[in-house]
Amino acid sequence: MKKLKFLTALSSVACTLIAGAAIAKTTIYTNVNGYTLVGGELHKFTHIQFTDDIIDKTFSSLDKQHLPKDAEIIDGHGKTMLPGLIDAHGHILSYGLSLLRADLSASFSAQDAVQRTLKYAETNPEIRWVQGRGWNQELWPNKTFPTAKMLDRFFPDKAVWLRRVDGHAGWANSKAMQLASISKTTQSPDGGEIIKDKHGMPTGIFVDNAMSLIENKIPPLTQKEQRIALTKAMNSLASLGITSVHDAGIDSRNLALFEQLAKEELLPIRVNAMLYLPSPNWQQRLTKGTFVTPDNKLQFNSVKIQADGALGSRGAALINDYSDQHGHKGLLLHSADDLQRYVAFAMQKGFQVNTHAIGDDANAKVLDLYQSLIENTNSKHLRHRVEHAQVLRLSDIPRFNELGIIASMQATHATSDKNMAQDRLGKERIQGAYAWRKLLEANAIIAAGSDFPVEPANPFYGLHASVTRQDRKNAPENGWMPEEKMTRVEALRTFTSDAAYSGHQEHILGELTSGKKADFILIDHDYFTVNEEDLWNLQVAETWVDGQRVFKR
């Protein structure tokens, strides 16, 4: 009897193993206008075969007699296929919240922004604080910061907090300032500024580290609210052709939620998480080490640090005064000792360090710090990054390749900033700003992103800006500083293979070649033959991650 039970159990195990082997599914996507980079060179194909989540091959001659038995055949109807696009610098939670809050990105004046906020508040009467994001005074007629008084007329009793498009300044009403105990005597914190009027009264604008004075009074998000925002964001990103995101600055609570979603197999796209330093319990979290989930959907091996503010709010740290504000050089957000402590600790724990630096002073200081600490920690192999690398001294450009540092840049920042950047920097400094061609010619690796929700998340906006140096109205003619343009191949590389390399994932992502993950998109027109001015308008028909379709238009 015992022998019979053993044979029955053994038979059951064998059946399970056979069934497990049988569930491997081979799919062949035929009749596509396929492109991928292979070792930096462009390769074309018309068919792709993958089994489960792994690519078997791409090819251009289909012999139906020798197809794998039971393979699923899908006709691509001539649509263009590209590798899944990787956004190397975005903010998933903030993007999800932006989809759930007042959207001020299209506001054409302060008054218009107020009206959009009012409309949002009227349709969401249950909210405790009225929050929004996206305003940009540089796009308004007078180009001046708004004030609390503009909001007070419509919101006398409910707190309002509206973040600027770059996330480096916020606009509060008087109720919000009252709840935060902000008064004439409140001093600006280190690395931040409370903007005050000629009488010394706070105007309602808080820059960089001063923003926390207001934000610390906003009730924290519940886990359910975070989960809703993350899910909404990731599904939206998939619809835009983004198959992987480097999430640039999250806390341990956010990371734990990503881990839970990954465990429940609820991540539609890949997430490469950067822990923000300093954030609660950051040392303890880094001490636990890096990790990646078995399906490579969630990876944690990097940190995000901010060295300075943004150019639009004059928070970027410059070596010399702003050309349009004498006596002002911007803001360094940490003391030299603190910045060194954060970077050194992360490097010693084996983490890639990704530091936000926009102004030439911040970039120079970060490069100097990297140079000394990379040698001390023997961590060049970790591929440390400078996030934005926006305004560089010409002498600092060769240092990226020399030190093995990646320039993580966002093309749409250039086309958004072009109307104010030279005012801020002057004719000489602008030569080292948004300098993609100079970096490429110095053999630097550029990883592309959008910095969503600071800029729109659509990666084709970034590809268009990279190739044309124009905004989506195709202005200016021939492009802004056209000598810095990329080719279409170079631009695609920054969003695919080089972005994958910047996340230590080039062995599985970035190219549609044998052995790599079946992450790809289909689009409505040929990226390589459509008119340059139409690149931004390309539409995603399908998005596939891990051999599974996660979006279909």
Image (cartoon, rainbow, N blue to C red):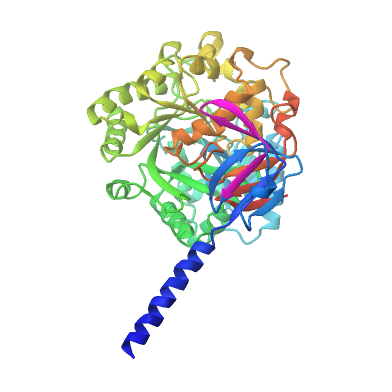
**Is residue 201 among the parts visible in the rendering?**
no
Percent x, y of residue 113 = 68, 40
Residue most extreme to the top: 428
Percent x, y of residue 484 = 58, 16
Residue at image location 57% in from the left, 35% down from the top: 450
In the figure, residue 348 lies in which quadrant?
A: top left
Magenta span contains residue 45: yes
Residue at image location 46% in from the left, 44% down from the top: 272
- Rendered view: 205 above or below 161: above
- Rendered view: 251 above or below 191: below
**Is residue 401 among the parts visible in the rendering?**
yes
Helix, strand or loop: magenta stretch: strand
Percent x, y of residue 129 = 57, 54
Magenta span contains residue 202: no
Instruction: Give whichever of 293, 20 is nearer the camera.
Output: 20
Residue at image location 46% in from the left, 18% down from the top: 443
Instruction: Give whichever of 381, 261 is nearer the camera.
Output: 381
Instruction: Give whichever of 523, 1 is nearer the camera.
Output: 1
Instruction: Give whichever of 108, 54 is nearer the camera.
Output: 54
Q: Quadrant of the N terminus?
A: bottom left
- Rendered view: 70 above or below 496: below
Residue most extreme to the left: 376
The span picked out in magenta is: 35-50
Question: Relative to residue 479, is residue 436 drawn left or right?
Answer: left
Residue most extreme to the bottom: 1
Question: What number of labels is visible?
Answer: 0
Percent x, y of residue 201 = 51, 35
Question: Relative to residue 147, is residue 17 drawn left or right?
Answer: left
